[in-house]
Amino acid sequence: MKLIIVRHADPDYSIDSLTKKGWREAELLSERLKKLNIKKVYCSPLGRAKDTASLTLEKIDKQAQICDWLEEFNARIDDPYTGEENRRVWDCMPAFWTKEKNYFDREEWCHTELMKKGDVEKRYNEVVSELDRLIESHGYKREGSLYRAVNPNSDTVILFCHFGVECVLLSHLLGISPMALWHGFVALPSSVTTLITEEREQGFAYWRCKGFGDISHLYAADEPPSFAARFCEKFTDGDRH
């Protein structure tokens, strides 16, 4: 089975849609995805994800199943480092979160004093439980950290969603703390992340990521990548800190 996670194209958050550049990115993305033999499409209910998916869906003549759990991961904390209240949990300053070794642990990251003050673990578990239900509907049932291959297949399934929730999905499938993914990786707008099942022993599968945040469809068309989700390389470069 192939699981493809697509981040929405360049967003206009003010209207929950896409910028003009975002629509160009979505068009180039659709030309790439239409060549795949897509079994099923799932999509976040948010406008920027649905608009990104719409061009691909039109080309492959399919409809997406809207999944509320694929909306942006919205667990929040009161950040003691910056003093900001109700801050998204996936946007912490490195000088703060890297001091706590448990944030690098796949099990303990959500059991720190700060995380336990909110509903972070509850929201995380809700998302990954829905992910496992989806995967099971396509033939693979989670058992421990593996997936039993109940109905092994080579189906291609696409999820259109957002960077924060994408990292939640990857953390669950690959056994990595989402804190390390949220803060150490970046999936730029319209990027494609591809995972495949590997059934090295009959009946049991594990996921392998063979491509993360790929935007080759943009480079092929000389379309520059968006800067959304990144911060400046040097503090003196600008105001995206």
Image (cartoon, rainbow, N blue to C red):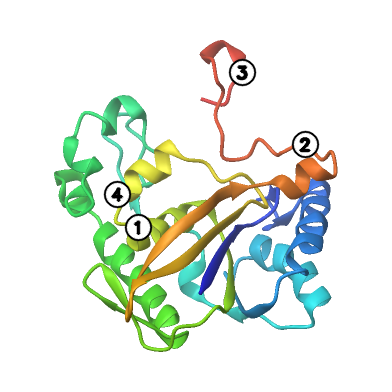
> What is the secondary structure assignment of the residue under circle 3?
loop
Report the residue at 44% width, 69% height from top: 197
Q: Is residue 87 above or below residue 45?
A: above
Distance, label 4 to label 3, CA atoms, is 30 Å
Q: Earlier in the sequence, mark 4 or mark 3?
A: 4
- Residue that numbered label 3 is attached to: 238
Residue 233 in which image quadrant: top right
Residue 236 in which image quadrant: top right
Crowdedness near tag 2: few (<14), some (14–19) or many (≥20) residues, C-alpha within 10 Å = few
Q: Amino acid at mark 3?
A: Gly
Distance, label 3 to label 2, CA atoms, is 19 Å
Which mark, residue 174?
Answer: 1
Distance, label 1 to label 2, CA atoms, is 30 Å
Q: Nearer the viewer, residue 190 or 94?
A: 190
> Position of 241 compared to 214: left or right?
left
Which mark, residue 224?
Answer: 2
Q: Amino acid at mark 2?
A: Pro
Distance, label 4 to label 2, CA atoms, is 30 Å
Crowdedness near tag 4: few (<14), some (14–19) or many (≥20) residues, C-alpha within 10 Å = many
- Tell me if label 4 and label 1 are in contact, CB under 8 Å: no
Report the residue at 26% width, 66% height from top: 122
> What is the secondary structure assignment of the residue under circle 2?
loop
